[in-house]
Amino acid sequence: MMKKMLVLNFFPANHPPVTGGEIRYFNIYHKLSRYYDITLLSQAGTRRTVQFSPSFREYRVPADPRHIQIITELVQELSSGRHGYELNLIKNLKLAQHPTLYKKVLDRLYETSDIIVHESSYLVEYDQNLGSDQKLRIYNSHNHDFLLAQNIWKNKNARKYLPLVYKLEKKLTTNANLVFATSTGERDSFITMYNLNPAKVKIAPNGINPDEWLKRQDISRKRPGETVKALFIGSYYPPNIEAVDYVITYLAQKCSGVEFLIAGGCCKPFSCAARSNVTLMGPISHSQKLQLFATVDLAINPMFTGGGINLKTLEFLSAGIPLFSTEFGIRGLELNDQQHYIKAEKKDFPDKINQFIQNKKMLIEIAQNGRSYVNHNYSWSAIAKNIKHEIDQLCGG
């Protein structure tokens, strides 16, 4: 009989998933549902139950009146400067202290669940039995929440909540039976910051589905002088917004022979590109993403801050797109410059693009190497099998 796994998260597992968080959230549990009976408990705009398969479903719990009240209070409290990203996270810290509809559903599902999984530390207070019952707890982190917040939260008033983020993530990591980090760097930071037993902190990186990509157009057939298309994609997330700003204000003007396509929620703060060779596409569907991945010539990843393994890096490589990335953008992956990708830092990014875009043979070879490496090492199926193995070890098989 399958063990019942209840997974707590503050955003839904949209299918097909679009943003990096959604991609990880859906795919890990979709693959794990071969071994466990899985219920995702998510927050969403409307009440809905989605049955993905007989052993995999999602309960989407809508906001209740306290939701609006807390947001109104937070907007006033965080009034100085940009605060949209921080507001959404702090909202969840506050809501978890109240008897919301989400908590009522959680309390009901808790009774019949064998394993409770937290996707972040922001909903910890809903789990009132954490540390006092015998049920298995897992923290399947997307990031080291406190460290990420400390590094990227810009709003001065929002930063007053950092001690609470630290306290809750410490509580979760201390009481969890297993903690999964997305990279060795974050595994080390969890162990060091929260004084954890290294034996219970494991790696569950971000991944890909190698078979989902469309066949790519052959860039070797591109005529001399024909515009090169470079893609960046990202959600509404401060590090992605920082990267888009860099493309618009610096990179595009230095690479006049390249058309930069920018897709995703990261376009939102930029009402217009202000450059003839930058196209802001905004949010796109999964099918549009697949088509873009098949037709662009290059992928760029000028990331300078953030946490976890960058999922767009894995997807670019898995799809076979020649990738130009900062070293930070490929963090957590053992990639070699000019073997799997082309390393390009803030100051020399345009020089690297201009240097290599005409060397199509080299770009094709690098892309093939990157694709083989990522598809072999980072499939969601393999990641899920490893998670199951670690749970089996904890449960004695």
Image (tube, rainbow, N blue to C red):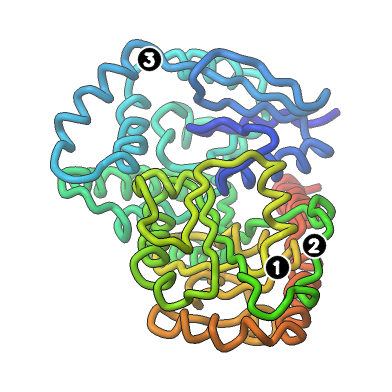
Q: Label 3, on which residue? A: 99
Mark 2 residue crowding within 10 angstroms, few (<14) / some (14–19) / many (20+): some
**How many angstroms separate mark 2 from mark 3 (CA)?**
51 Å
Q: Is residue 225 above or below residue 116?
A: below
Closer to us: mark 3 or mark 1?
Answer: 1
**Residue 199 in view of the camera:** no
Give percent across and percent down for residue 324: 57, 75
Q: Residue at x 82, y 30 (%)?
A: 2
> What is the quadrant of residue 17 in the picture?
top right
**Where does the image place residue 222, in percent across and percent down from the top left?**
74, 73
Q: Nearer the viewer, residue 143 or 209?
A: 209
Q: Earlier in the sequence, mark 3 or mark 1?
A: 3
* Residue kind at label 2, given as amino acid type: Arg
Q: Secondary structure at mark 2?
A: loop
Mark toward the viewer: 1 or 2: 2
> Residue at position x 70%, y 45% from top?
28
Residue at numbered disc 2: 216
Earlier-in-chain disc, 2 versus 3: 3
Which secondary structure lies at badge 3? loop
Check disc 1 and report the residue beneath it.
321
> Vertical placement of 339 versus 154: above or below?
below
| Lower position in the chain sequence, tag 1 or tag 2 | 2
Hey, which quadrant is residue 111 in on the image?
Answer: top right
Secondary structure at badge 1 equals loop
Describe residue 293's horizontal placement relative to residue 89 as left or right. Answer: right
